[in-house]
Structures are given as structure tokens and as C-alpha cells.
Image (spheres, rainbow, N blue to C red):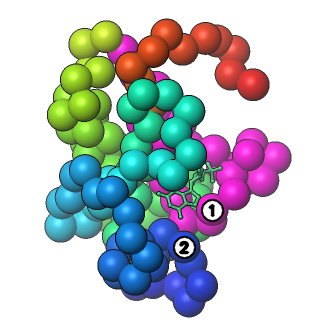
Amino acid sequence: MSEADCLFCKIVAGEIPAKIVHETDRTLAFRDVNPQAPTHVLVVPKDHYPDAAALAAVDHGLADDVLKAAHAVAEQEGVADSGYRLVFNTGAGAGQTVFHVHVHVLGGRGLTWPPG
Ligand code: 5GP
Ligand code: ZN
């Protein structure tokens, strides 16, 4: 289930290169091209859903898979113990720019609160 002209669908399809760090049957994780922390990885479901609200509405455990993959990435990156942040920017007003749902896994430095 992909959408034409979706950047992350193209990364999932291998049509646009990305530094892939983790993969499951239903998720893919790759490094953000413009990292905001030493660890900055994006975890996406391979199927196209536009945002976290759409992901939450599907009733087959996909959101669970994305969350588990995000934690696996944090462990793999060595930030699980020091602390890491998961961010779903949801909607343009929250800074979402790519409308294929993705969770940012950020870590490897101190993270302040509140976010900008
Ligand atoms: P959003 O602003 O939608 O929450 O996050 C989109 C993220 O995708 C941004 O952090 C941005 O740096 C990243 N991004 C945009 N284009 C590309 C790309 O072509 N490859 C990769 N790996 N990341 C991208
Ligand atoms: Zn997509």
C-alpha cells in the first residue's frame, strides 16, 4: 500500500536511497537526512498512512510494531539507557512536513523540555 509521490514510500521501495538501520516485516528505520541529535532515526510503517492519527485508527497492531521498532532502534543505537525521545509531529501546525507517518528517535545528547 503505497502512495505516488510519497518520499517515504519511495524510500521503502528502494527508489530513493537512505541509511537503513533497522527493518521488520512491517517497518523500516533510516537515518534522518538532517539530524538534530547524534542519534536521529525515523521509523515508518512500510504501508502508507499519512499521520499518527491514521496509524492509531488501524486495528491490526501496526502502531504497536512501530513503537517496538523505535525502542529496538534506541537499544541498537546505545541510547536506551541514557534516554531518548520519540516524536510524532502530527499536522503541519506541529511541524509535520512529510505526510507518511514516522516517529523520530532522538538521543545521544541532553534533550531540553519544552521542545520548540
Ligand atoms: P517531520 O517534519 O515531517 O516530522 O519530519 C520529516 C523528517 O524527514 C525531517 O526531519 C527531515 O529532515 C527528514 N527528511 C526529509 N527528506 C528526507 C530524505 O530524503 N531522506 C531522509 N532520510 N530524511 C528526510
Ligand atoms: Zn508513503
Residue 15: horizontal and vertical position, in percent?
40, 83
Span colored in magenta: 83-105
Q: CA distance from mark 2 to mark 1?
A: 7 Å
Residue, x 38% and y 63% (percent of image)? Answer: 18
User: In the image, is the residue at mark 1 within 8 Å of ligand 1 by its beta carbon?
Assistant: yes
Residue 41: horizontal and vertical position, in percent?
40, 43
Residue 34: horizontal and vertical position, in percent?
56, 46
Q: Check contact, mark 2 vs mark 1: CB within 8 A.
A: yes
Residue 115: horizontal and vertical position, in percent?
68, 22
Along the viewing direction, whichever of 52 and 104 lies nearer the viewer: 104
Answer whether residue 54 is visible to the viewer in this image. no
Task: Note whether 89 is above or below 49 in the view shown.
Answer: above
Q: Secondary structure at mark 1?
A: loop
Task: Note whether 9 is above or below 91 in the view shown.
Answer: below
Ligand 1 visible in quadrant: bottom right
Q: Amino acid at mark 2?
A: Leu
Residue, x 54% and y 73% (percent of image)? Answer: 7
Side of 5 where 77 appears, left or right: left
Side of 7 where 76 appears, left or right: left
Answer whether residue 70 is visible to the viewer in this image. yes
Asked where in the image residue 72 lies, by quadrant, the reply is top left
* Residue 92 is a magenta residue: yes
User: In the image, is the residue at mark 2 within 8 Å of ligand 1 by its beta carbon?
Assistant: yes
Residue, x 69% and y 52% (percent of image)? Answer: 96
Q: Secondary structure at mark 2?
A: helix
Along the viewing direction, whichever of 53 and 45 lies nearer the viewer: 45
Residue matched to label 1: 98
Residue matched to label 2: 7
